[in-house]
Image (cartoon, rainbow, N blue to C red):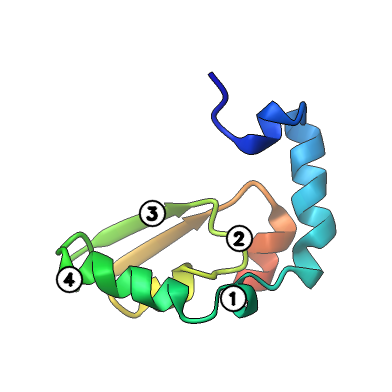
Amino acid sequence: MSLHPFEGEGFDRGRALKFWDDIALDYEGCAMQGAIPGKIVQRLCDMEVLGPDTDAIEFGCGPGTYSVPMSERVRSLTCVDASEKMLSILSD
């Protein structure tokens, strides 16, 4: 069973990390997805999955496409990503 599309493409962990690090500065996740991240976060709030008393962890957060709108709706948010370059963009 494959857990990530990269595994199906034959990417090992090192190759996958290099891919994300290489595109980090040009990644336009927020721009490409438009209003979708905000709508998804709103839906999670409407379903009471997220809220002001929620401590959340986002795995694979990238540059913050979902983290930024989510951070405004939860008590705390921990962001995790294997790509140091993606995390550096989020922290800027």
In three-dimensional space, the C-alpha distance between marks 4 and 2, rounded to whole angstroms, equals 24 Å
Question: In the rendered structure, which amino acid carries the disc numbered 2?
Answer: Gly
Mark earlier in primary sequence (4, 2): 4
Mark closer to the observer (3, 4): 4
User: In this figure, which residue is indicated by the disc labeled 2?
Assistant: 62
Quadrant in which residue 50 is drawn: bottom left
| Residue 57 in view, yes or no | yes
Whole-percent x, y for residue 35 in the image: 46, 81
In three-dimensional space, the C-alpha distance between marks 4 and 1, rounded to whole angstroms, equals 22 Å
Name the disc covering residue 57, or none.
3
- Drawn side of residue 49 relative to residue 65, left or right: left
Mark closer to the observer (2, 1): 1
User: In this figure, which residue is indicated by the disc labeled 4?
Assistant: 46
Question: In the rendered structure, which amino acid carries the disc numbered 4?
Answer: Asp
Label 3 crowd bin: few (<14), some (14–19), many (20+), radius 10 Å: few
Mark earlier in primary sequence (4, 1): 1
User: In this figure, which residue is indicated by the disc labeled 1?
Assistant: 30
Mark earlier in primary sequence (2, 1): 1
Mark closer to the observer (4, 2): 4
Question: In the rendered structure, which amino acid carries the disc numbered 1?
Answer: Cys
How many callouts does the rendering have? 4
Say whether marks 2 and 1 touch (CB < 8 Å).
Answer: no
Q: Secondary structure at mark 3?
A: strand
Quarter placement of the C terminus: bottom right
Mark earlier in primary sequence (3, 1): 1
Whole-percent x, y for residue 57 in the image: 38, 54
Question: In the rendered structure, which amino acid carries the disc numbered 3?
Answer: Ile
Q: Residue at x 68, y 67 (%)?
A: 88
Whole-percent x, y for residue 80 in the image: 52, 52
Mark earlier in primary sequence (3, 4): 4
Mark earlier in primary sequence (3, 2): 3
- Drawn side of residue 60 relative to residue 55, left or right: right
